[in-house]
Image (cartoon, rainbow, N blue to C red):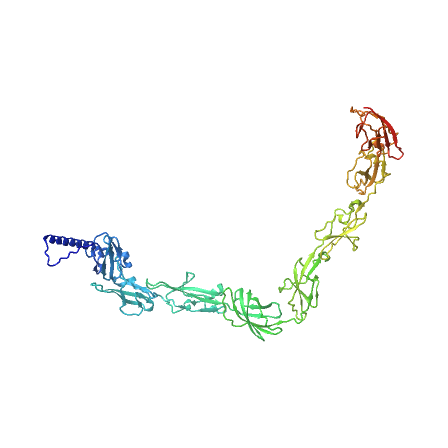
Amino acid sequence: MLLKKTIIKPNKMISQKNIKSIFQYMAFFFLLGLSTDLAAQCAGTDNTVTVCNKDQDVATRTFDLFTSLGGAPTTGGTWMAVSGANTSALDEATGIVDLWVINRFGAHEFQYTNTACGESAIVTIMLGGYPGADNINGGANACNDENDLNLYSFLGSNISGQVQDFNGTWSEAAPTGFLNDNIFDATQVDPGEYTFLYTVDAVDTCPSRQATIILEVHKLPTVGTPVETVFCADEDFSTLTNYNLNQLLNGEDINGTWSQNDVDLPNRFIDLQDIYNNSGTGTYTYDYEILPSNFVCDIATISVSFTIEAVFEATISATDYCSGTPYIVNIEYDDNLVADGTYDIEYLVAASNGNYTLTASSNLNGGTGTFTMTLPAQVPLNETMDLTVIGITSPAGTLFCDLATTPQTTFSVLDIDGPPTIQAEANQTFCTNLFGGTEPTLADIGITSTGNVVFFDTMTSAAQLPATTPLVNGEDYFLSSSDPSNSCVVAVRTRVQVTLITPTDPTTTDISPLFCASDNPTLANLAITGDGTGTITWFDAPTGGNSLADTSALVDGTTYYATLLYDGGCESTNKIMVTPTVVGVDSASLQFTTLEACALDNPTVEDLIALEEVSNFDVIWYDQPENGNALSASEPLVTDTMYYAESYDPITGCILSARVAVTVDLSHCDPVEYDFFIPDGFSPNGDGRNDVFFIPNIEIIFPDFTLEILNRYGISLFKGDINNPSWNGETNNGTAPNGVYFYVINYNKEGAEPIQGRLYLNR
């Protein structure tokens, strides 16, 4: 706001009008200042309020902050706890605060904000402390096994919502040194009563206050500490039939009870003899429980165990071993002291070049067992060494007492100096039919060796196979030789794989088969059946003899012998005998190989059949030298054509494929016999009768004839032959006129002279 400043100068007269103006200005500024003060106080002013003994006035649970503001605040604003810890105690809309929820004595600020004027004011509450109610009449109890006892848990009161402050100070009436702030370690003190004081400081006009706790610490029952107890299986348990379980504890209260597997025992005594007889070695666990003499401490329990350990009372025996073979040690032991099972044997081998501590697994059963030594490569050969069992353990958890005596023996490992050699074919085949009804065995394997031969089923197996072991087809066997002086087997083994072949005899359904010679039958055509494995092979004799190729031609009446040959040289036990009949057919026997006839007689195949001579075979006529069509007897013959005669055996169906050729000539006709004549004229007028000059049958009787027609001037008008035998009266220059013409005929046949004549053309 821009205020106008009025300056009154001296030595000037002030008019009445000016005086009035001055009062008006003064009134304006007074009202302006008054309205500004009123607006600035809408949030009130800061104020401090002291509240003592809040726990004695329930009204402090609904303390109204608005009424505690200074000035003239107006409603409509909001409240906020300056410390976030007090937010839960404040209703921010109404300004009502629950002082019982504030559990820390001292100053607490709350801010009121009125947005109408944008101002805030703070109410500060000086809150007196509340230490809680005394607890001195047996209400505070603890057990001496609690090391973090919270003393606050013993303060407070029976009034709901009334909780002591937490920023006071704890102290002991008689210091023990085991109080840390509000935490007391009861495990460090003796059972008894202990007094604790909790003090809250004075705040403003509120005095300091104090609460007292008398804590009684009770004794936890003492179950003691376990005593490790071990019995050996060879113990005289007859003296332990009334064993006191409290011997398993040290420092325990003796008023407890014993149980096992949640089953209470009638007393603290047990029968160890009965336990061992029924359950043997093992760990046995029992529970000891003591009830407290108060209702503060928990029941005290402890689990304790004793162990009955097995005892290994044994003897061992070894031998002289061949190098590379399993070094098996025999064990005999008292099976009353060790249960059957698998155990780890720790043993010591003492040799000239040092001691070797080793471990092996052993299966002990019924008083006996074995273990196999695994000796390092540096163990010397051909030397007597000491073997001592120095320990035994069980993978299953069986415990053993220390060995009272250590089983001992001696042994040596023998080397084979210059091992015998063995040679054998890697793959050997055996024909089972050569063994007279028995099976081939290992002894039948072909071997060359300077020592004794031993057999194994694998490259590493220790067990030898008897030489009488039957061979198995496809099986591998491993051969080695042994030194006769010590029976040690050479470590190197020779592998032999055996193949067993059981030959079968060939079979046939026809030992006297019939073949046609024209089929050129061979041994391959004989129907022999094998087993699909052997190869059919032919011989010319029942034993020995010469082998014959499958392509060998069969000879009529000859006997052949078949066998089956197999890989590896095996052969059928018996040969099969086959004697084939090979039927040969003779060539057709004919009187002539040329048939001369006259076509005018209409000759047929029947005329060819007439050429056949008497024979044991039939003849079939064909139109081709091979294959072709078989001709019937009524088939007309064609001149200058070849026909073929094939011999046929009607009994066997065999034929002779080589056919006999016959040439047919049908031009052998006598002109006189067949009324041959030459017409003397023709009339080519198109009436369908005698329209051409044609000599009947000339092409049959004289197939090579030529015909020429000339006019009276000797000019040739037409030339004909078998392919153009008739003249129609036409010339190259047109139609020949009526008249006399001349013909010249050359028969071109032996015994037939050319002839000339005339003819008359009349249209």
Q: Residue at x 23, y 59 (%)?
A: 124
Q: Is residue 538 left or right of residue 94?
A: right
Q: How many marks?
A: 0
Report x, y in % for residue 705.
Answer: 85, 33
Q: Is residue 92 left or right of residue 524?
A: left
Q: Is residue 99 in sight in this rendering?
A: no
Residues 607 and 276: in front is 607
Q: Quadrant of the C terminus?
A: top right
Q: Is residue 625 in sight in this rendering?
A: yes
Residues 246 and 139: in front is 139
Residue 714 location, quadrant: top right
Q: Is residue 469 left or right of residue 347?
A: right
Report x, y in % for residue 469.
Answer: 67, 61
Q: In the rendered image of this protein, does residue 150 appear above or below residue 380?
A: above
Report x, y in % for residue 462.
Answer: 62, 65
Report x, y in % for residue 229.
Answer: 45, 69
Residue 743 location, quadrant: top right
Q: Quadrant of the N terminus?
A: bottom left
Residues 200 and 563: in front is 200
Residues 260 and 39: in front is 39
Residue farthest toward the bottom in the current orientation of the protein: 352
